[in-house]
Amino acid sequence: MTHYGMIIDVGRCVGCYNCFIACKDEFWDNDYPPYSRAQPDRGQYWIRLKEKERNFPQIVVRTDFVPIPCMHCRDPPCLKAARDGAVYVREDGIVMIDPEKSRGQRQIVDSCPYGVIYWNEELQIPQKCTFCAHLLDQGRKRPRCVEACPADAMVFGDLDDPDSELSKLWRSAEVLSPEQAKGDLLAPPGSDEHGVSVKYLRLPKPIVGGSVIFGDTGECAEGVRVTVRGGDGVAAETVTNAFGDFMVEGLRMGGKYVVRLEHPDYQPKELEVTVNGDVNLGEVRLDRR
Ligand code: SF4
Ligand code: SF4
């Protein structure tokens, strides 16, 4: 059997919105009975790009983009909320909303923990990503969004094939949590209680950064060794740049860490940090030994 799935590598996504536009191009004003009815021109995002701005002056200013389609859950809450078989899971794992049976069933929209179902006011039906099932059934290999991605940030394939690229990446991929999808992208990844068919690589994680200064000269402290320790040991290491700046990524939301700064000519300094988002320690001065 085939079980379709997708991995989105956030580290490769450049935020070009090609996937979003390809989805609009495929579904806006186009009916594909019995798969789906036309997507309206406003208010629906079958693949939504969520953005997280990271702003550490002099170190990094960038935006991370996380595309969020339907997760095509193996145990979908939307199916449980639907009446009369209006939501069903195909043999290939694609979760579909029947555009006829779902008419008037607004409760289906609210049932999705990821917030990826949209209400079509004109047609009075709930709608969402179908993995382009109408195209796959015609022999196409990938949904339009995956085809349109210029950065190869999306891998689509068969999770039941252990040799597929998707299956190999799957083991190390993370589950997007409903909190990340609906709230802060830096929230902890999910536990996969619904058995998702979409996972992620390199989801954004909290950053800790700062600027180190030699206290006696007031100069930028280049070459200071920075070690970030959590309860599980060393979480990250780096060295300050020519401006005395440093930044480490990949920390756990809610985690408690000790940031240790070391230089051969200066007294080491330790700072305790609780990570409830990105943390900018600002200016940190080191005293000469
Ligand atoms: Fe249903 Fe939401 Fe899961 Fe998609 S992500 S299958 S819409 S519960
Ligand atoms: Fe990111 Fe690819 Fe979508 Fe562009 S098309 S926003 S690179 S996932």
Image: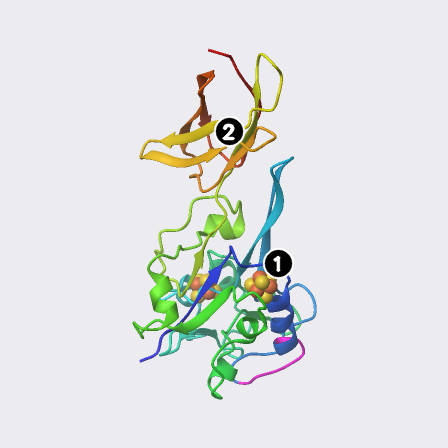
* Residue at the far bottom in the pictured view: 138
Please name the amino acid that badge 2 sits on: Gly
* Residue at the far right in the pictured view: 41
Looking at the image, which is closer to me, 235 or 43? 235
Q: Dot 2: what SS?
A: loop
**Residue 41: x and y, percent?**
70, 70
The magenta stretch spans which residues? 27-33
**Residue 114: x and y, percent?**
49, 57
* Nearer-N-terminus badge (2/1): 1
Let me know if residue 280 appears in the view. Answer: no
Q: Residues within 10 Å of mark 2 (few under 14, many from 20)?
A: some
- Whether 214 is drawn above or below 103: the answer is above
Disc marking residue 288: none
**In the rendered image, which quarter is residue 7 located in?**
bottom left
- Whether 78 is drawn above or below 135: the answer is above
Residue, disc 1: 15
State left or right for residue 189 relative to residue 10.
left
Q: Quadrant of the N terminus?
A: bottom left
Q: Residues within 10 Å of mark 1 (few under 14, many from 20)?
A: some
Residue, disc 2: 223
Main secondary structure found in the magenta portion: loop
Q: Residue at x 44, y 38 (%)?
A: 253
Q: Dot 1: what SS?
A: loop
Q: Is mark 2 within 8 Å of ligand 2?
A: no
**Residue 278: x and y, percent?**
53, 36
Q: Is mark 1 within 8 Å of ligand 2?
A: yes
